[in-house]
Image (cartoon, rainbow, N blue to C red):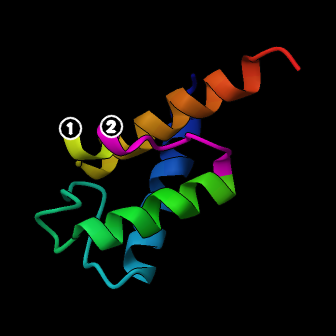
């Protein structure tokens, strides 16, 4: 997975978190920036809309809640979805 992919997904995560009312940047932590379980559900739903089902599993978000880690999780899980047989 290329760094450009992660960088563009990270930009998406930052923009989406800001749209959800959080004050974040690339070095932020989702929960330390005011994210709650409700905001997490909204972020997960938007990730699924944009990147496919299970793009951001809740356990990934609750385990590694840094913005970069969230982007890496989406990139990893999106790749798994994209590479699965049709």
Quadrant in which residue 41 is drawn: bottom left
Cα–Cα span, label 2 and label 1: 5 Å
Quarter the C terminus occupies: top right
Left or right of 51, for residue 12:
left
Q: Nearer the viewer, residue 70 or 49?
A: 49
Element type at mark 1? helix
Mark 2–mark 1 CB contact (< 8 Å): yes
Q: Residue at x 51, y 27 (%)?
A: 76
Quadrant in which residue 36 is drawn: bottom left
Tell me if residue 24 comes above or below residue 66 in the rendering: below
Element type at mark 2? helix
Q: Residue at x 54, y 61 (%)?
A: 45
Query: Which x, y percent locates residue 85?
Result: 83, 14
Quadrant in which residue 60 is drawn: top left
Q: Residue at x 17, y 62 (%)?
A: 31
Q: Nearer the viewer, residue 14 or 55?
A: 55
Q: What's the mark number on residue 50?
A: none
Tell me if residue 61 comes above or below residue 24 in the rendering: above
Q: According to the image, label 2 marks what residue?
A: 60
Q: Which residues are magenta?
A: 51-60
Q: According to the image, label 1 marks what residue?
A: 63
Is the residue marked by circle 1 packed among few (<14), some (14-19), or many (20+) residues within 10 Å? few
């Amino acid at each position: 997975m290329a760094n450009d992919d992660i960088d563009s997904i990270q930009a998406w995560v930052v923009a989406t978190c800001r749209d959800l009312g959080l004050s974040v940047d690339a070095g932020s932590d989702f929960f330390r920036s005011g994210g709650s379980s409700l905001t997490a559900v909204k972020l997960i739903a938007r990730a699924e809309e944009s990147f496919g089902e299970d793009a951001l599993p809740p356990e990934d978000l609750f385990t590694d809640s840094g913005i970069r880690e969230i982007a890496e999780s989406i990139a990893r899980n999106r790749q798994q979805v994209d590479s699965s047989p049709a």
